Image (cartoon, rainbow, N blue to C red):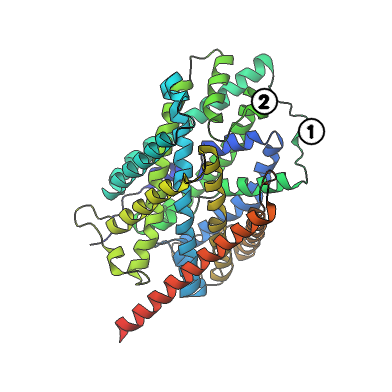
Amino acid sequence: MELRRVLGFRDLVFFYTLTCFNLRWIASAAEAGPSSLVVWILAALGLFVPLVASVLELSSRHPEEGGLYVWTRRAFGDFPGFMAGFLYWASNLPFFPALLYFTAANALFLGGAKGAALQESRGFFLAFSLAGVIVASAVNVRGLKYGTWLHNAAAVATWIPAAVLVFSGVVVFAQSGSATSFSPAHLVPSADVKDALFFSTIAFAFGGIETASFLGDEIRDPRRNLPRALLVVGLLITAAYVAGTASLLVALPAREASGLTGITRAIAAASAKAGLPAMQVPAALLITLAGVGVTGAWLATAARLPFVGGLDRFLPPVFARVHPKWGTPVVAILVQSALSALFVLLSQAGTGVKGAYDALVAMSVISYFVPFLFLFASTIRLSKAPLPGGAIRLPGGRPVSVALAALGFLTTAVSLLLAFVPPGDEPNQTFAAAKVLFLTLALVAGGAALYAASARRRRVLRT
């Protein structure tokens, strides 16, 4: 049974909203102060623009299911393709609980004083996160025809608080000025390690524009709809991150921003100063819905990698099984959900909520950036081939595509190296860096061992 083409242009715009734009990054950026506005722009020029251009080029040439995995395999062969897909898939496992912790922290505002009492409750965060995985899994098993309802509603729920924050920031600034100074001295990023590490986090926030390409066989007219959606969402997201961060800093001093709850608090503070009705509870409700929707969108993306791996026999054929009624890769989705739930449980081992959240974000960055190196390198190599019928090319042709891909490769490589550097408040810098390096090498070794096992299995099947 084949996959069903159910995603149109509007669905792609909403889907990209969920995977590329996340309110938690606005809170994290505001916590770093006004210089984060300049960092947003630098990251957009250095990574986001090259990423959009490369995905546009590659998805137009090769719009089939599998996205980055398919492109890397076409450009460099089976093993690099497998490793790119494996590392991308692995990066999602710690990402899900980090995302759900953020969602749970903002959902606490729905409970008033009782909710505030649960801010350090491991039980609440675990229960909420597991429930989020279950809901996202159930919707995705039913198929993107139904999953788009959650994705589209969550995308609207993402844009409403962002719009309220920006509007309130403008009103507050006009009425009483800003809570944060935006003088030139405050806008210039410093050259210390802390700001350098922050750049890698902001670059990470611009990821996600590659996600819908993993669903190529489930998109209607992908060569037409993917590029249109990429361009529309790319402009919206860059503007929203910069405007949202500036508005949050207008409403709150940087020292009061928080990566977990800063958005809800900022919307409440800004709307109150602007004379609008109380927005804390509605904003918390919308952010909660958005968080569950983002989980569903990323789960749909990540599950397509083991599905395609099953089709290509890098994984057991059961991963390629499609549900007879709903036309979804049901085994791949359920395995992805089970492993995500396991990471939710493991993430709380021996640490508090804030420590778990920070550790999970850090774990995601390295395994996520390595596949981007393959993506940009694939753009350079595959752009040599003649353009297929119906495909589009960037203005300026191959020289522009190669130049942007090279810039993206360089930015990704720098961000990747920075991700290995421990935070400044880490008491044992050497041990922390060694631990990150060891875990990265272990992850790569695990992927290589899985590929070797699949190669042996395929040789047996051929004989």
Q: Is residue 120 visible?
A: yes
Which amino acid is tagged 1? Pro
Identity of the residue drawn at 42% across and 70% down: 450
- Judging by the rendered image, the residue that carries numbered circle 2 is 253
Q: Nearer the viewer, mark 1 or mark 2?
A: 2
**For the residue labelled by badge 2, is the local secondary structure a helix, a strand or a loop?**
loop
Up-down relation of residue 271 to residue 291 (above or below) = above
**For the residue labelled by badge 1, is the local secondary structure a helix, a strand or a loop?**
helix
Identity of the residue drawn at 61% across and 61% down: 437
Q: Position of residue 446 (x, y in %)?
A: 47, 67
Q: State left or right for residue 50 relative to residue 137.
A: right
Name the residue nearer the viewer: 222 or 429. 429
- Judging by the rendered image, the residue that carries numbered circle 1 is 184
Name the residue nearer the viewer: 210 or 352. 352
The quadrant of the picture occupied by the C terminus is: bottom left
Q: Position of residue 262 (x, y in %)?
A: 56, 30
Identity of the residue drawn at 57% across and 27% down: 166
